[in-house]
Image (tube, coloured by chain):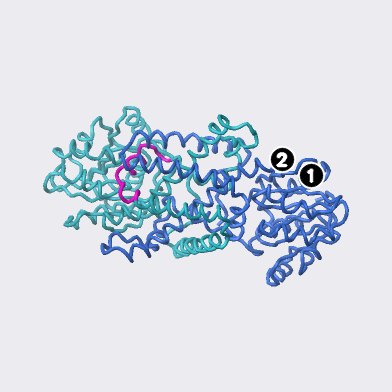
Chain colours: A blue, B cyan
Amino acid sequence: MTKKPLFDKIAVIGLGLIGSSLCWRVKRDGLAKRIAGHARTAATRAKAMELGFVDSAHDTPAEAARDADLVVLCAPIGANAAIAEEIGPVLKRGAIVSDVGSVKVCVIRDVGPHLPDGVHLVPGHPVAGTEHSGPESGFPELFENRYCILTPPPGADAGAVERVAELWRRAGSNVELMDPHHHDRVLAVTSHLPHLISYTIVGTASDLETQLRREKQDVSDVVETREVIKYSAGGFRDFTRIAASDPVMWRDIFLNNREAVLELLGRFVEDITALQRAIRWGEGETLEAFFTRTRAIRRGVIEMGQAGSFNPAEPEKE
Amino acid sequence: MTKKPLFDKIAVIGLGLIGSSLCWRVKRDGLAKRIAGHARTAATRAKAMELGFVDSAHDTPAEAARDADLVVLCAPIGANAAIAEEIGPVLKRGAIVSDVGSVKVCVIRDVGPHLPDGVHLVPGHPVAGTEHSGPESGFPELFENRYCILTPPPGADAGAVERVAELWRRAGSNVELMDPHHHDRVLAVTSHLPHLISYTIVGTASDLETQLRREKQDVSDVVETREVIKYSAGGFRDFTRIAASDPVMWRDIFLNNREAVLELLGRFVEDITALQRAIRWGEGETLEAFFTRTRAIRRGVIEMGQAGSFNPAEPEKE
C-alpha cells in the first residue's frame, strides 16, 4: 500500500466482533498511524493487546479518545450516551465521532448533545457480522463487499462525512448515505424483525420438550430438543444461526428501535394469523397464492446478487 | 460398483426435485435395472426423457407402476390418495409402495386403504431439498449425508422396510425409523413452522411498500422492496431462500399436518407476543435473558455437526 494513512490516531471504543475487525483492517492497510482501544473489561483489553490489533488499550473511553482524529463507538448502543458524556470534554477540535450501531436515530439523540462545538458526528452502520462475538472473533475482511450506511444529521460537515466514507471504502465496503429515520425503518425489516423471529422460534422449540413432558402421557407427542437439533437442516438451522448473535447488542437494538420494530411486528402477527386461519379452515388456494407471491422476492435477491452488488450465494461465516 | 441392483423395476411417480434426484442416483449407481417415471404434464415427461434420468415416461401412474418392484410417490402429498387409488389394481404381489413426503400420518391414511393384500407400504421422508423445483433441478448427490426417516405402520413387513432402507443408504443417506405421528410433530418444529414463518415475513415485507405509499405522506416512512432486497444480507436473506420453495408442495404439507402446525403456531405467537410486550415496556432484562438462552441451542447444532452426523457449516445449494 502506497496510500497515506487517513488519520493520525483512531480510537475504537468497544472491542468486540465489529470493533476488533475494524482495528485489524486499519492496521493491515495502514489506514491510521495509531489505534487506541478501550474495552469495559480488563480481560478484553489484555486480549486486544495480546492479539495485537490495537497499539494501546485504555481503562476509560476518555483516555483512548484523547487527541484522536476519529473516535468510533463500537459498544452496544445502549452504552453510547454514557460514553459520549465521558469523552465529550477531552475531544479535540475538528475530531470526528462515528459509530457502528444497527440503529441510527438513537445515536444522534444520545451522542449529539455531548459533543462540543467543532466536533463532527457522522453515525455509521457497517451491515456486516457473524454469529460470533468478542475480541477473538474479528478479522480484517469482515466488511469486504458489504454495505456501510452513513446517516449524517442535517447540516453535518461534508469533509468529515467524506473522511468516514473513505475509511469504510478502504475497508472494502460499499458506502451509502441515508436519512437516519429511514435507515431504522429499513433495517427493522431486513434485520431486526428477522432476528426477533429467529430468537422466538428457537425459544419456542426449546420450551416444547419441557412443557410437553410435564403435561402429556403420550410419549409420541413429546418432541425432544435433541431431535430438533438432529433434524435441523430442514429450515430450523438457519434460525439457530441468526439466534446465536450477541444478546446484549440485540437487547439494545430492540429497545432503541422500538417504534419501527413494534409497527412491523404488528403487521407480521396479523399476517401469520391470517395464514393460521387459512390452515385451520383448509383454504388451500389462499395458501398457494401466498406462497407463490413470496417467490418473486427471492428472485429479486438473486438478480441483485448477480448484478454484482453482493453475493447471496456466499455462506455466512460459521 | 460391483453391487447387484436392489430392484428390477422402480417406478417414480412425480418427477420434480426429489423424484428426479432419486432417479439420477438410482441410475448412476445401478440401484435398479429399470426406472419408469410418471409426471402429470407432457412437458415434464418429455424433459425427463430428454435429460435421461428415466428409461420410460408414462402418461398415467398406473402404466408406470405396472410390474414395478418398488413404487415411490414423489408428487405433492395432496395427490397421493388419487394416485394410490389408480395404481392399486395394477400392483403386483410383493411390490413395495413408498413415498418421500414431509408429512407421514396422512400417507398411511390416504395410501394404505388403496393397496391390495400382499403389497407393502413403507412411507419415507428424505430430509433434503433445495429452493429449486422441477425436473431440471435434480442431482444424484442431493441425499448425501442427509437423514432419511422411514415410518412403517404397525405390522409392516420387516423385509420390505429393510429393502427401502438399503435403497436410501445406497443413495448416501442416514436412515432412521420413527413413529409416523412423532415424525409429524418433530418436522412441524424443524421444518414446517420455519417455512411458514419465512413465507410470512417475506410477504409482510413485500406488502409494506404498497401499503405505506397508499397511507403516508412522509417519504422517509416508505420502505421500498428494492431496499429490502438490497440490504437483505442482515438476516432477511435466509428467509427469502426458505420462502422460495415449491408453493403446491408446501400448501399440501400445511393442510396435511394441520394439527401439529397449529399447536406449534399457537405457542410461537404467544412467545412473540411476550417479546413484543417486553419491547414495548422497555424490559431489557427479559429480552437479554431470552436471547442468552437461545444461544445454547445453536451450540447444540454445532456440536452435533462436529460429531459427524451432518455439517451445519455446509451452505444450502443456491
As drawn, B208 above or below B287: above
Distance from label 1 to label 2 (Cα)? 9 Å
As drawn, B157 above or below A186: below
Residue B254's x, y, as percent? 34, 44
Amino acid of disc 1:
Val
Query: Tags 1 and 2 in contact by the CB under 8 Å rule?
Result: yes
Residue B111's x, y, as percent? 20, 44
For the C terminus of chain A, which image quadrant?
bottom right
As drawn, B122 above or below B64: below
> Residue at 71% of width from left, 42% of height from top?
A175
Toward the left, the furthest residue is B117
Mark 1 packing: few (<14 Cα in 10 Å), some, or many (20+)?
A: many
Question: Mark 1 highlights which residue?
Answer: A161
Q: Which residues are magenta?
A: B245-262
> Residue at 44% of width from left, 46% of height from top?
B197
> Residue at 82% of width from left, 43% of height from top?
A157
Chain containing mark 2 = A
Residue B246's x, y, as percent? 40, 38
Q: Return the mark for residue A61.
A: none
Mark 2 packing: few (<14 Cα in 10 Å), some, or many (20+)?
A: some
Which of marks 2 and 1 precedes in the sequence?
1
Quadrant of res A30: bottom right
As for residue A58 lying within the magenta part, the answer is no
Would residue B224 be found to the left or right of residue A107 on screen?
left
Toward the right, the furthest residue is A93
- Which of the pair B273/B73 is nearer the observer? B273
Chain containing mark 1 = A
Question: Mark 2 highlights which residue?
Answer: A177
> Residue at 56% of width from left, 35% of height from top?
B225
